[in-house]
């Protein structure tokens, strides 16, 4: 099993940046993918970015146009999400997820096995 806990600043000004952290525990000594998703009020959960836990492989959603960067610190068992040029449209609950069933990356939330509780990010105009 994998336990995931998200953390980060909850309120950000438009135009600013955020950095979220996802601390993993449990099954952290094998290769699998972690990802960030987000869900805005009244909208479906959407893919943000994904990274391989042990292999140098990561990418973000095309819709975010290069505004996000996902990285990992294996020594700390932590994955980070950096997002820049924030707008109120980025307001959402941000979730961390782990996909252990396969070694392939995925943008589909249905293919992820473990989820964090989510952390609220609000971007004020």
Image (spheres, rainbow, N blue to C red):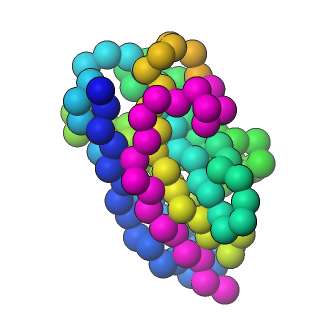
* Count of all numbered marks drawn on residues in the image: 0
Q: Where 29 falls versus 49 (above or below)?
A: above
User: Which segment is the magenta one?
Assistant: 106-125
Q: Is residue 28 visible?
A: no
Name the residue nearer the viewer: 106 or 74.
106
Q: Quadrant of the N terminus?
A: top left
- Is residue 48 covered in magenta? no
Position of residue 25 in the picture relative to residue 115 (left or right): left
Determine the residue positioned at 72% across, 65% down: 42
- Is residue 107 covered in magenta? yes
Position of residue 115 in the picture relative to residue 123 (left or right): left
Determine the residue positioned at 38% across, 42% down: 79
Q: Is residue 36 visible?
A: yes
The spot of residue 117 in percent (x, y) is 40, 53
Q: Where 91 falls versus 6 (above or below)?
A: below
Q: Where 17 falls versus 52 (above or below)?
A: below
Quadrant location of residue 59? top right
Determine the residue positioned at 43% across, 41% down: 115
Query: Which residue lies most toward the bottom here?
Result: 125
The spot of residue 112 in percent (x, y) is 52, 30
The spot of residue 52 in percent (x, y) is 46, 25
Name the residue nearer the viewer: 88 or 43.
43
Determine the residue positioned at 39% across, 26% down: 53
Position of residue 33 in the picture relative to residue 63 (left or right): left
Q: Quadrant of the C terminus?
A: bottom right
Name the residue nearer the viewer: 79 or 38.
38
Quadrant location of residue 86? bottom right
């Amino acid at each position: 099993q994998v336990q995931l806990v998200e953390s980060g600043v909850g309120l950000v000004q438009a135009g600013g940046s955020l950095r979220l952290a996802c601390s993993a525990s449990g099954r952290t000594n094998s290769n699998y993918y972690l990802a960030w998703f987000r869900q805005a009020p009244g909208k479906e959960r959407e893919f943000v970015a994904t990274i391989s836990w042990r292999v140098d492989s990561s990418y973000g959603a095309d819709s975010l146009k290069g505004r996000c960067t996902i990285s990992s610190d294996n020594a700390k068992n932590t994955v980070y999400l950096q997002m820049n040029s924030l707008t109120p449209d980025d307001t959402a609950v941000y979730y961390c997820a782990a996909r252990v069933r396969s070694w392939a990356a995925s943008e589909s939330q249905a293919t992820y096995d473990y989820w964090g509780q989510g952390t609220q990010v609000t971007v004020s105009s």
